[in-house]
Image (cartoon, coloured by chain):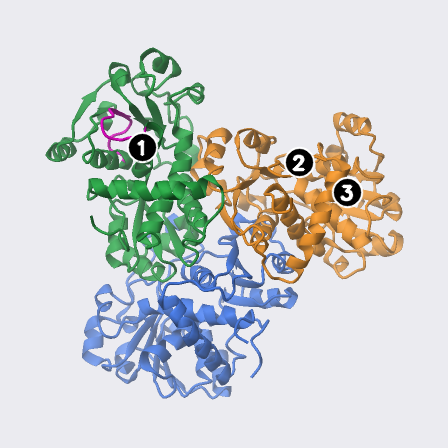
Chain colours: A blue, B green, C orange
Amino acid sequence: MRSFLGRDILSLKDFEREEFFRIFEVAEQMEPIARSRRNSNLLAHKTLVTAFYQPSTRTRLAHEAAMHRLGGHVTGFADAKMTRAGDWYQESIKDTVKMLEFYGDVIVMRHFQQGAPHEAAKWASVPVINAGDGWGEHPTQILTDLYTVLREKGRIDGLKWLAVGDMRMRTMHSLAYALTQFDCPVTFVAPPEMSLTEEFKAELRQYSLNFKEAEHVEQVIHEADVILVEPVVQPDYTKARDERKGDVGQTPANYKITRELLERKAKEGAILLHSLPRMDEIPTDVDITRWSRYWQEAFYGVVVRMAILALVLGAME
Amino acid sequence: MRSFLGRDILSLKDFEREEFFRIFEVAEQMEPIARSRRNSNLLAHKTLVTAFYQPSTRTRLAHEAAMHRLGGHVTGFADAKMTRAGDWYQESIKDTVKMLEFYGDVIVMRHFQQGAPHEAAKWASVPVINAGDGWGEHPTQILTDLYTVLREKGRIDGLKWLAVGDMRMRTMHSLAYALTQFDCPVTFVAPPEMSLTEEFKAELRQYSLNFKEAEHVEQVIHEADVILVEPVVQPDYTKARDERKGDVGQTPANYKITRELLERKAKEGAILLHSLPRMDEIPTDVDITRWSRYWQEAFYGVVVRMAILALVLGAME
Amino acid sequence: MRSFLGRDILSLKDFEREEFFRIFEVAEQMEPIARSRRNSNLLAHKTLVTAFYQPSTRTRLAHEAAMHRLGGHVTGFADAKMTRAGDWYQESIKDTVKMLEFYGDVIVMRHFQQGAPHEAAKWASVPVINAGDGWGEHPTQILTDLYTVLREKGRIDGLKWLAVGDMRMRTMHSLAYALTQFDCPVTFVAPPEMSLTEEFKAELRQYSLNFKEAEHVEQVIHEADVILVEPVVQPDYTKARDERKGDVGQTPANYKITRELLERKAKEGAILLHSLPRMDEIPTDVDITRWSRYWQEAFYGVVVRMAILALVLGAME
C-alpha cells in the first residue's frame, strides 16, 4: 500500500481496497477525539488552507472542524469573490497554488471546473484534497458515506446499494469508483436525462463493478441495504439567486424516498444516506425513522476528514 | 441557581437575578486576561461555531475574540450568502444545526428570523447563544451593557435608566426583560411609530418593571444615571444596498443626545451607552466628554462573551 | 534605532536603513520555522485582527499564515460587505478601530482610501499595519521584495533596479521611499499617463534617490540586477465585475518582459519580481527561466510578515 504521507486525495478511481481500510482504521482511532469534544494536539503545528471557489457549508466546515479537532490552524477563502483569485481575469490555478503552498501545509480545494484540484496538485509542494471539482469527483464525501456504512452496519462487503439522483454528479462518480473495490452490487435510479453515460458505464464494466439501472425506486428499494440519495431537481444556477425561486418543482415519485415507501418496502436494517442539503427527495417525516442516517453523516464527515488530514500530514505514520 | 453548563443563552426573559450576577462574577475573573492581552488556555480544547445569517461586525468578532482570549478554536460562516444554507431554498434550521453541532462545541447564531436560535437549540446537542434574532432579543448585548454599568458605576441596583431608540428592536426587548430583575426604574423615549406595543407593556407590568414613557429626551435626561441610545433612523433594508443612500434624514432632536444637552441637563456622573454603529443620534463631539462609555463597551463585550463561553462550556464550574 | 515594539507600520517613508536591516535580520531567524513547516509558539498568546475593506488574497493570507506560523490566533473580516462597517453609511474609522483594538493585539488593514490606516493608528492602542491604502503605500509588499533580493542575491546595496508598471500605484510609492535608504539606482518605465508625478519626483530628489525614467524596457533592461514588474493594464473597477471582461487589451511591448527579451538582453544574474496576480506583462513561459523569482516571493512574504508581527508584538525584544 502506498503511504498517505504527502499524498494528494483527488479521486477514488486510483484508490485501492486496502487504502480505503487504512483510512477507516485511522478514522476509528480519531472518533473518540471527536466524540469526547476535546480537541487534540496531533496537528497543532500545521496549517490547513481552504481554497473554495464555490460556496459550501458542510464540506468546508467539516474540514475546518477536523483540523481544529486535531489542534491545527486554518486559513484560506470561503468564496472566490472575496479574493483577487476569483476576479474576472481568473488568475491561473498554477499562480494561485504557487502562493497557497506557502501559506499552509495542506490545501483543500473546491472548484467549479473539473480537474482544477489535479492541476493544483501538479504545482503544489503540499498535499491537495479535492473537495468537489465541477462534474468531476467528491472523494471525501464518498469516503464519509462508506465509513458511515462501516460504523452503522459493521461492514461494507456484502451489502447491496441503491443510488438515487443525478448520475452526472461528482458524488456519483466517486461512489461508482469506490464500489469497484468492494463486494457491493449497486442499482442506479435516475431520470433519463441524468442517467449514467454510455462511456462511464463502459468504464465501470471494465472495472468489474456489479451494477444495474432501474426506473423507479419502488422497483428496487426492497433489495437495498444502503440507500444513497441526491437531489434530482436543482435550481438553474446560471440564473441570479433571486430568479431561481419557483424554478424547481416537486421531485417525481420515481426518485423520492417517502416514509410510506420505506415502511412498505425497505429492509428493516437498511440505512438511508444523503449528503444534504436536500430538496424534497427525502421528506422530513423520514428523519425519525429507523432508516435515516444522514445526520450521523455530519459527525462521521468530521472523523473521516481528521483521518485524511492526519495521514497526509504524517501524524499517524 | 441553574447551572450554566451546556445551557442555551436565548433570552433574558428567563434569566434570574443571581444568574446575572454569576455571569458578572465570572466576567470579572476574565477581565485580567483581556486586559493583559495575553490569551489563556481555558478553552484550548474547544471550538466555537459562528452561524451568522446576517452580517455583523461587533457581535461576531466579540465572540470570536472572546474564544481566542480563552485559547479556543473558531469556525463557521459570517454571511449566509457564502453557504448553501443561505441559498434560496433555505435549508431548514434543523438540518443545518444537525450538521453544525458536530463541527464545534457551542454555536453562536444571528438570524433575520425571530426565534431561529430557539429552533436551533431544540435540535442541537451543544449550547446555542442568540446573537440577535430579527425583532426578538439580543441577550449578550444587554449583558454587556449591564456589565459596563457595573464596572463603570460600581453597582446596578438603584440607578435610573433612560432608553432612547426604536422600542421594537431586539436590544430593547432584552433590556426591558433584564431590568425586571434589578431595582432600576427606566424611562423609554421613542418616536410614536416605534414605541412599546401595548402587549409588551402589559407583559412588563406583569413582571413589575418600574417604567414610564416620555416624548423628548430633554424632559427626562436630568433624572438618568444610565443613558442607553439606539438609532431611530434606519435605512430601508428591503432596498438594495446602493439604493439606500439618502433614505435617512437627520435624527429628530427628541431622540438625539448632543453635547450641549448633556452639559446643560445630564447628571455629572451619568454614563452614556450605545452598542454602535451609530447614525447621528450621538454626535462625535460627545466622544471625549465625561459621559461617553460606548467605546469601553467593546472591551466589556469581549469580557462578557468570555464569561458566557467559559460558563456554558464548563471551564468555570 | 527606534524599537519596533508597539509600533505602527504605515509607510516606508519614515523607515531608516538600520530598521530595514533589523526586520531582515529577524526574518532570517523566522525563515527556518516557515521552511520546516512547523508552526511555533512565539505568539501563541496573541490575536491578529484583519480589517480588509477590499478583497485581497496574497496580502491577507500572508499575514494570516505568518500569524499561524507563530502559533497565534486570527479574527477579523476579509470583505467590508460582510460587516456593518462596510454598509452604505460608512461607520467612521475611529468608531471601527475603537472596537477592533479590543478584539486582538495587532490590526492589519487594507482600505480603498489613502490614509485610512494612518487614521486607524491615531485611535488604536495596538499596532496598525498598512496592508495597502488606496493610491498610498504598501510597505509590507516592498519589504518582501527587498528581503527577496537580499536572500536571492545576498545583498541589497549596489544593485540596479528596473521598475515597470503604473507609477501612481502604492507599491511604487513604497518602493521609491525604500530605495532612498540603499545604494540602489532605479529606472522607472511606465506609460506616459501612469508616470511619476512631478511632485513625487521632486520629493524623491529631495531624498537623493538616484533615479531616471525610460520609455521602453528594451532600452534599459540590460543594466538591471532587479526587475520589478506590475501590471499597466487594469480593468475599470468602477464597472460591475461582469462588465469588465474585454476591457483590457494586451500589455504594450514597452512594459512587457518576455522570455525572448530576457534571453536577448537581461543580465544572467538578474532576478525578476512581481507581487502577482499578473495580467500578460510576464508571459508564463518566463516562469521556468533563471530570472523568475515571483513564486519565491510568496514564501518570503510569509517570512517578512512573521518578522513584522514578532517585532511589533514584542516576541523578539
Q: Does the magenta-highlighted stretch encompass residue B163?
A: yes
- The residue indicated by pointer 1 is B150
The answer to which quarter of the image holds residue B279 is top left
Magenta-highlighted residues = B154-169
Query: Of residues A252 and A95, which is closer to you in this image?
Result: A95
What residue is pinned by disc 3? C164
Q: The residue marked by circle 3 belongs to what chain?
A: C
- Marks 3, 1 in one chain: no
**Residue C311's image quarter?**
top right
Subunit ID for the residue under disc 1? B
C255 or B58, which is in the foreground? B58
Quadrant of residue A8 within the rendered picture: bottom right
**Residue type marked 2:** Glu
**Mark 1 and mark 2 on one chain:** no
Q: Can see residue A277?
A: yes
- Cβ–Cβ under 8 Å for marks 1 and 2: no
Q: Tell me the mark number nearer the camera, choosing from 3 and 1.
A: 1
The CA distance from mark 1 to mark 2 is 44 Å
Residue at position x 58%, y 81% in the image: A2
**Was residue C152 drawn as part of the magenta stretch in this picture?**
no
Q: Nearer the viewer, mark 2 or mark 3?
A: 2
User: Which mark is nearer the camera, 1 or 2?
Assistant: 1
Three-letter amino acid code at the position of disc 1: Leu
Q: Which is nearer the N-term, disc 2 or disc 3?
A: 2
Q: Nearer the viewer, residue B210 or A167?
A: B210
Q: Which mark is residue C137?
A: 2
Mark 3 residue type:
Val
Which chain does tag 2 point to? C
Q: Contact (CB < 8 A) between labels 3 and 1? A: no
C160 horizontally vs C229: left or right: right
Q: Magenta region's main secondary structure?
A: loop
